[in-house]
Amino acid sequence: MGVADGMLRVMPGWEVGFWGHMLALDNLIPLATGVGLFLALGAYPFIESWVTGDKRGQHLLDRPRNRPVRTALGVAGSVSISSP
């Protein structure tokens, strides 16, 4: 809920005329961005197992030194999301 509220607050109030109707993009763009973000987060484990070819059971507590690419992507994602 906090992510959705934050995206709505950041988006400026844009309106576009489309076939004689005014469309408010201030709700549409954050909605599409949020859906895309959560779909990407949900699809990541499946994409990673497909790319690496690892079909074994995945454990949450892998050591970072054993999975350097996963660690680097996680850190890059968290830093890019949290920085202004």
Image (tube, grey):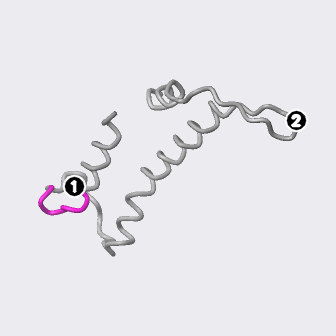
* Residue 42, placed above or below residue 69: above
Query: Camera-side residue: 56 or 28?
Result: 28
Q: At 37% from the left edge and 59% from the top edge, which residue is drawn?
A: 45
| x and y percentages locating residue 23 in the rendered image | 75, 33
Residue displayed at 31% across by 36% down: 83
Residue 65: horizontal and vertical position, in percent? 12, 60
- Residue type at mark 2: give it: Gly
Q: Nearer the viewer, residue 19 or 65?
A: 19
Quadrant of res 27: top right
Mark 1 surroundings: few (<14), some (14-19) or many (≥20) residues within 10 A: some
Is 27 covered by the magenta stretch? Answer: no
Give the label on residue 71, or none. Answer: 1
Q: Is residue 78 left or right of residue 50?
A: left
Which residue is painted at 70% across and 31% down in the image?
15
Image quadrant for the C terminus?
top left
In this image, 35 relative to 67: left or right?
right
Q: Which residue is mark 2?
A: 20
User: How many labels were placed on the picture?
Assistant: 2
Q: Which residues are magenta?
A: 64-70
Say few, some or many: other residues with alpha carbon within 10 Å of mark 2 (under 14 / 14 to 19 / 20 or more): few
* The disc label shown at residue 27, or none: none
Residue sitting at the far right: 20
Question: Mark 1 or mark 2: which comes first in sequence?
Answer: 2
- Where residue 73 sits: x, y (%)? 28, 55
Q: Give the CA separation, mark 1 to mark 2.
A: 50 Å
Name the secondary structure under disc 1: helix
54 to 41, vertically: above or below: below
